[in-house]
Image (tube, grey):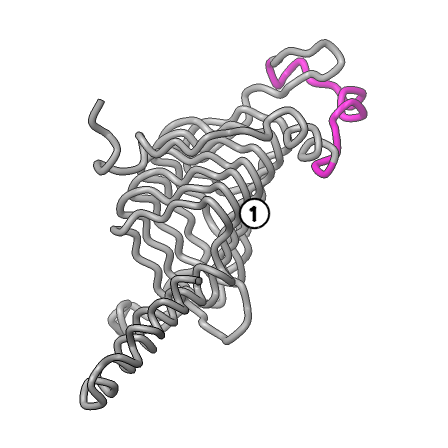
Amino acid sequence: MSKFGKLLKYYYRLPWRLWGPVNVLLSRKFTDRYKFRKSHVGKNTYIDPTVSILGWRNVLIGNNSVLSEDVWLNINHREEGIIRIKIGNNCHIGKRNFFSAGPLINLKDFCFTGIDCHFLGCGHHTESPMVPYIATGLTEGDIIEIGVNCWLTTSVTVMQGVKIGHGSVIGSRSVVLNNIPSFSIAVGNPCRVIKRYDFKNDKWIDVQDWSEELNSYIPAEIDYLKLLNEKNSDISLALISSSRRFGWI
Protein backbone atom coordinates (compact mmCIF):
# COMPACT_ATOMS: atom_id res chain seq x y z
CA MET A 1 0.00 0.00 0.00
CA SER A 2 1.29 3.50 -0.87
CA LYS A 3 1.92 6.18 1.77
CA PHE A 4 -1.13 8.04 0.54
CA GLY A 5 -3.25 4.89 0.84
CA LYS A 6 -2.09 4.32 4.42
CA LEU A 7 -2.89 7.93 5.26
CA LEU A 8 -6.43 7.54 3.94
CA LYS A 9 -6.85 4.37 6.01
CA TYR A 10 -6.10 6.24 9.24
CA TYR A 11 -8.11 9.25 8.08
CA TYR A 12 -11.35 7.27 7.92
CA ARG A 13 -10.78 5.97 11.47
CA LEU A 14 -10.84 9.52 12.87
CA PRO A 15 -13.96 10.94 14.59
CA TRP A 16 -16.01 12.86 12.06
CA ARG A 17 -15.51 16.13 14.03
CA LEU A 18 -11.80 16.03 13.12
CA TRP A 19 -12.35 15.51 9.40
CA GLY A 20 -12.63 19.26 8.67
CA PRO A 21 -9.30 20.31 10.28
CA VAL A 22 -7.53 17.28 8.83
CA ASN A 23 -8.91 18.09 5.37
CA VAL A 24 -7.33 21.55 5.57
CA LEU A 25 -4.00 20.07 6.67
CA LEU A 26 -4.03 17.48 3.91
CA SER A 27 -5.06 19.86 1.16
CA ARG A 28 -2.62 22.63 1.95
CA LYS A 29 0.47 20.89 3.25
CA PHE A 30 0.43 17.28 2.20
CA THR A 31 -1.39 17.18 -1.11
CA ASP A 32 0.25 20.32 -2.57
CA ARG A 33 3.72 19.23 -1.56
CA TYR A 34 3.15 15.71 -2.85
CA LYS A 35 1.93 17.01 -6.21
CA PHE A 36 4.84 19.48 -6.36
CA ARG A 37 7.42 16.78 -5.76
CA LYS A 38 5.81 14.49 -8.30
CA SER A 39 5.39 16.98 -11.13
CA HIS A 40 8.06 19.64 -10.55
CA VAL A 41 11.00 17.85 -8.88
CA GLY A 42 12.85 14.90 -10.38
CA LYS A 43 13.90 11.64 -8.77
CA ASN A 44 16.71 11.54 -6.22
CA THR A 45 16.82 15.34 -5.96
CA TYR A 46 17.56 16.98 -2.60
CA ILE A 47 16.03 20.34 -1.66
CA ASP A 48 17.22 21.59 1.72
CA PRO A 49 14.45 22.58 4.17
CA THR A 50 15.86 26.14 4.30
CA VAL A 51 15.29 26.73 0.56
CA SER A 52 12.74 29.47 -0.23
CA ILE A 53 10.65 29.09 -3.39
CA LEU A 54 8.26 31.92 -4.24
CA GLY A 55 6.13 30.66 -7.09
CA TRP A 56 7.02 26.96 -7.06
CA ARG A 57 4.41 26.16 -9.72
CA ASN A 58 6.70 27.99 -12.16
CA VAL A 59 9.79 25.97 -11.17
CA LEU A 60 11.06 22.72 -12.71
CA ILE A 61 13.99 20.76 -11.24
CA GLY A 62 15.50 17.64 -12.81
CA ASN A 63 16.79 14.35 -11.46
CA ASN A 64 19.73 13.81 -9.09
CA SER A 65 20.19 17.52 -8.33
CA VAL A 66 20.85 19.48 -5.12
CA LEU A 67 19.55 22.84 -3.86
CA SER A 68 21.70 23.77 -0.87
CA GLU A 69 20.99 25.76 2.28
CA ASP A 70 19.34 29.17 1.99
CA VAL A 71 18.85 29.08 -1.78
CA TRP A 72 16.12 31.51 -2.86
CA LEU A 73 14.11 31.00 -6.06
CA ASN A 74 12.00 34.09 -6.73
CA ILE A 75 9.47 33.99 -9.56
CA ASN A 76 8.52 37.58 -10.33
CA HIS A 77 5.89 36.85 -13.01
CA ARG A 78 3.76 33.91 -11.87
CA GLU A 79 1.47 33.05 -14.75
CA GLU A 80 -0.06 29.61 -14.36
CA GLY A 81 1.64 26.84 -16.32
CA ILE A 82 4.73 28.79 -17.45
CA ILE A 83 8.14 27.59 -16.25
CA ARG A 84 10.30 30.53 -15.16
CA ILE A 85 13.18 28.69 -13.45
CA LYS A 86 14.43 25.43 -14.88
CA ILE A 87 17.28 23.47 -13.26
CA GLY A 88 18.41 20.34 -15.10
CA ASN A 89 19.67 16.90 -14.12
CA ASN A 90 22.82 16.35 -12.05
CA CYS A 91 23.05 19.99 -10.98
CA HIS A 92 24.49 21.29 -7.70
CA ILE A 93 23.25 24.72 -6.57
CA GLY A 94 25.48 26.10 -3.82
CA LYS A 95 24.51 27.74 -0.54
CA ARG A 96 22.78 31.13 -0.61
CA ASN A 97 22.30 31.25 -4.37
CA PHE A 98 19.65 33.78 -5.45
CA PHE A 99 17.47 33.48 -8.56
CA SER A 100 15.34 36.46 -9.59
CA ALA A 101 13.49 35.24 -12.67
CA GLY A 102 12.11 37.29 -15.54
CA PRO A 103 10.99 35.24 -18.58
CA LEU A 104 13.28 32.29 -17.78
CA ILE A 105 16.41 31.23 -15.93
CA ASN A 106 17.58 27.95 -17.44
CA LEU A 107 20.45 25.99 -15.90
CA LYS A 108 21.09 22.94 -18.05
CA ASP A 109 22.36 19.51 -16.97
CA PHE A 110 25.54 19.17 -14.90
CA CYS A 111 25.59 22.85 -13.85
CA PHE A 112 27.60 23.50 -10.71
CA THR A 113 27.39 26.76 -8.75
CA GLY A 114 29.40 27.73 -5.71
CA ILE A 115 28.39 29.80 -2.67
CA ASP A 116 26.60 33.15 -3.10
CA CYS A 117 25.94 33.09 -6.85
CA HIS A 118 23.20 35.37 -8.18
CA PHE A 119 21.05 35.22 -11.30
CA LEU A 120 19.35 38.56 -11.90
CA GLY A 121 16.81 38.06 -14.66
CA CYS A 122 14.46 40.83 -13.57
CA GLY A 123 14.54 44.12 -11.65
CA HIS A 124 12.49 47.15 -10.60
CA HIS A 125 11.63 50.11 -12.81
CA THR A 126 13.97 53.09 -12.34
CA GLU A 127 12.49 55.72 -14.66
CA SER A 128 11.90 58.26 -11.89
CA PRO A 129 13.89 58.71 -8.67
CA MET A 130 10.84 60.50 -7.24
CA VAL A 131 9.04 57.18 -6.84
CA PRO A 132 10.28 54.72 -4.19
CA TYR A 133 11.98 51.93 -6.10
CA ILE A 134 10.35 49.36 -3.83
CA ALA A 135 6.98 50.47 -5.26
CA THR A 136 7.84 50.99 -8.94
CA GLY A 137 6.95 47.49 -10.04
CA LEU A 138 8.92 44.86 -11.89
CA THR A 139 10.46 44.99 -15.34
CA GLU A 140 9.76 42.22 -17.85
CA GLY A 141 13.41 41.18 -17.65
CA ASP A 142 15.21 38.84 -20.01
CA ILE A 143 16.31 35.22 -20.31
CA ILE A 144 19.40 33.80 -18.59
CA GLU A 145 20.76 30.54 -19.99
CA ILE A 146 23.61 28.51 -18.50
CA GLY A 147 24.80 25.72 -20.79
CA VAL A 148 25.54 22.07 -20.04
CA ASN A 149 28.36 21.43 -17.54
CA CYS A 150 29.18 25.01 -16.55
CA TRP A 151 30.90 25.83 -13.28
CA LEU A 152 30.20 29.16 -11.62
CA THR A 153 32.75 29.25 -8.82
CA THR A 154 31.99 31.67 -5.93
CA SER A 155 29.97 34.90 -5.72
CA VAL A 156 29.30 35.06 -9.46
CA THR A 157 26.57 37.43 -10.66
CA VAL A 158 24.85 36.75 -13.99
CA MET A 159 22.76 39.56 -15.44
CA GLN A 160 19.60 39.31 -17.55
CA GLY A 161 19.96 38.56 -21.25
CA VAL A 162 23.19 36.57 -20.79
CA LYS A 163 23.96 33.15 -22.25
CA ILE A 164 26.96 31.16 -20.97
CA GLY A 165 28.00 28.47 -23.42
CA HIS A 166 28.40 24.80 -22.48
CA GLY A 167 31.58 23.60 -20.81
CA SER A 168 32.54 27.01 -19.43
CA VAL A 169 34.03 28.09 -16.09
CA ILE A 170 33.34 31.51 -14.55
CA GLY A 171 35.85 32.80 -12.00
CA SER A 172 35.15 33.98 -8.47
CA ARG A 173 33.33 37.31 -7.98
CA SER A 174 32.80 37.79 -11.71
CA VAL A 175 29.91 39.89 -13.01
CA VAL A 176 28.70 38.46 -16.32
CA LEU A 177 27.19 41.19 -18.48
CA ASN A 178 27.64 39.64 -21.94
CA ASN A 179 27.44 36.21 -23.57
CA ILE A 180 30.29 33.79 -22.93
CA PRO A 181 31.20 31.35 -25.76
CA SER A 182 31.31 27.59 -25.17
CA PHE A 183 34.33 26.03 -23.45
CA SER A 184 35.66 29.30 -22.04
CA ILE A 185 37.30 30.34 -18.82
CA ALA A 186 36.13 33.87 -18.00
CA VAL A 187 36.86 36.18 -15.06
CA GLY A 188 36.42 39.73 -13.81
CA ASN A 189 34.01 42.64 -13.56
CA PRO A 190 32.92 42.94 -16.27
CA CYS A 191 33.59 39.28 -17.03
CA ARG A 192 35.95 38.61 -19.95
CA VAL A 193 37.20 35.42 -21.59
CA ILE A 194 40.85 34.59 -20.87
CA LYS A 195 41.07 30.97 -22.11
CA ARG A 196 39.29 28.64 -24.56
CA TYR A 197 39.49 24.85 -24.78
CA ASP A 198 41.30 23.68 -27.90
CA PHE A 199 39.72 20.36 -28.90
CA LYS A 200 42.21 19.90 -31.70
CA ASN A 201 45.09 19.64 -29.21
CA ASP A 202 43.05 18.80 -26.08
CA LYS A 203 44.18 21.68 -23.85
CA TRP A 204 43.18 25.12 -22.60
CA ILE A 205 44.86 27.94 -24.52
CA ASP A 206 45.05 31.71 -24.03
CA VAL A 207 42.25 33.51 -25.83
CA GLN A 208 44.73 35.50 -27.95
CA ASP A 209 45.94 32.20 -29.44
CA TRP A 210 42.44 31.18 -30.50
CA SER A 211 41.69 30.96 -34.22
CA GLU A 212 38.46 30.59 -36.18
CA GLU A 213 39.63 27.17 -37.38
CA LEU A 214 39.36 25.81 -33.83
CA ASN A 215 35.62 26.52 -33.74
CA SER A 216 35.06 23.59 -36.09
CA TYR A 217 36.33 21.16 -33.45
CA ILE A 218 33.91 22.27 -30.72
CA PRO A 219 31.22 19.63 -30.06
CA ALA A 220 27.59 20.64 -30.29
CA GLU A 221 25.87 20.89 -26.91
CA ILE A 222 23.59 17.91 -27.56
CA ASP A 223 26.57 15.70 -28.45
CA TYR A 224 28.53 16.98 -25.45
CA LEU A 225 25.63 16.15 -23.12
CA LYS A 226 25.30 12.67 -24.59
CA LEU A 227 29.00 12.04 -23.98
CA LEU A 228 28.77 13.28 -20.37
CA ASN A 229 25.78 11.05 -19.68
CA GLU A 230 27.52 8.01 -21.14
CA LYS A 231 30.66 8.48 -19.03
CA ASN A 232 29.10 9.87 -15.83
CA SER A 233 25.94 7.90 -15.17
CA ASP A 234 26.69 7.25 -11.48
CA ILE A 235 27.39 10.73 -10.03
CA SER A 236 26.50 10.91 -6.32
CA LEU A 237 24.81 13.91 -4.73
CA ALA A 238 27.30 16.18 -2.93
CA LEU A 239 25.13 16.47 0.18
CA ILE A 240 28.08 17.05 2.48
CA SER A 241 28.62 20.52 0.99
CA SER A 242 24.95 21.40 0.70
CA SER A 243 23.75 21.50 4.31
CA ARG A 244 24.88 21.52 7.92
CA ARG A 245 22.68 18.42 8.27
CA PHE A 246 25.40 16.44 6.45
CA GLY A 247 28.53 18.53 6.98
CA TRP A 248 29.98 16.88 10.10
CA ILE A 249 32.77 14.44 9.25
Q: What quarter of the picture does the C terminus occupy?
A: top left
Q: Which of 27 and 216 is in front in this view?
A: 27
Give the overall secondary structure of the magenta segment: helix
The residue drawn where x is 81% and y is 25% is 216
Q: Quick one: label 1, few (<14), some, or many (20+) residues within 10 Å?
A: many
Q: Which of the 4 image quadrants contains residue 68? A: top left
Judge from the rendering whether residue 96 lies leftward or rightward of residue 211; answer left or right.
left
Q: Nearer the viewer, residue 32 or 125?
A: 32
Residue 211 among magenta residues: yes
Judge from the rendering whether residue 77 lies leftward or rightward of residue 25; answer left or right.
right
Q: Which amino acid does label 1 sit on?
A: Glu
Q: Give the range drawn in magenta.
A: 206-222
Q: In the rendered image of this protein, does residue 60 appear above or below residue 170?
A: below
Q: From the top left corner, tell me how far across and down residue 197 is, in percent.
A: 64, 19
Q: From the top left corner, tell me how far across and down residue 57 is, in percent.
A: 45, 68
Q: Where is mark 1, residue-wise?
A: 145
Q: From the top left corner, tell me how far across and down residue 89 is, in percent.
A: 54, 43
Q: From the top left corner, tell me how far across and down residue 148 is, in percent.
A: 60, 37
Residue 53 among magenta residues: no
- Residue 125 visible? The answer is no
Judge from the rendering whether residue 130 lies leftward or rightward of residue 153; answer left or right.
left
Q: Nearer the viewer, residue 242 or 2?
A: 2
Q: Nearer the viewer, residue 56 or 39?
A: 39
- Residue 168 visible? The answer is yes
Q: In the rendered image of this protein, does residue 37 appear above or below residue 193?
A: below
The residue drawn where x is 51% and y is 51% is 42
